[in-house]
Amino acid sequence: MSSNTIKYKGQIGSIEHDLDRGVLYGKLLFINDLVTYEAENLRSLEQEFRVSVDEYLADCASMGIEPNKPFKGSFNIRIGRELHRKLAMKAADEGLGLNEAVQLAVERFVVKGSRP
């Protein structure tokens, strides 16, 4: 992650600043629940982030619900009917499932840094 994020217990948090108020603040990223934290310096912000994560996880446990986790490994995409058809046909020609074909294309884009 970039230097504008912090990580703890599988959660990723943002680091933002409010120059007018002279504070740092952030929220947990890539989840549906809203969890925020604020502090006057970076060391305190990281502490507040950890406290917020711990409280969030404890609240979820006490309510008997699974906490949101960033990047579950699945997502929905919209690519248009024609591209969907072409992808399905190409995947079938290659003996692949649709998920495998999409994964290969994404890996090529992300890992190799080139457009598929």
Image: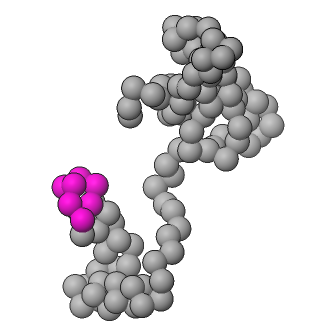
Can residue 106 be seen here? The reply is: yes
Q: How many marks?
A: 0
Give percent across and percent down for residue 34. 71, 38
Taking the magenta stretch, the answer to whether it contains residue 69 is no
* Residue at left offset 56%, top offset 26%: 16
Closer to the camera in the image, 97 or 49: 49
The quadrant of the rendering that contains the C terminus is: bottom left
Question: Where 69 sits versus 84, above or below?
Answer: above
Relative image position of residue 68 (x, y in whole percent):
63, 43
Q: Tell me which residue sits at (31%, 75%) in the image.
A: 101
Quadrant in which residue 110 is drawn: bottom left
The image shows residue 20, relative to residue 69, as above or below, that is above
Left-right relation of 62 to 93:
right
For the rendered model, the colour scheme is one colour
Q: Quadrant of the N terminus?
A: top left
Judge whether residue 51 can be spotted in this image. Answer: no
Q: Is residue 85 left or right of residue 55?
A: left
Residue found farthest to the front: 20
Q: Residue at x 39, y 73 (%)?
A: 99
* Of 115 and 35, the residue lying toward us: 115
Stretch in magenta: 109-115
Viewer-closest of 70 and 24: 24
The image quarter in which residue 85 lies = bottom left
Is 92 situated above or below 75?
below
The verdict on residue 114 being magenta is yes
Location of residue 64 in the rendering, given as x and y in whole percent from the top left corner: 77, 40
Q: Give 95 or 40, whichever is nearer the viewer.
A: 40
- For residue 100, what is the image quadrant? bottom left
x and y, in percent, of residue 93 in the image:
24, 91
With 71 as the anchor, is 115 left or right in this view?
left
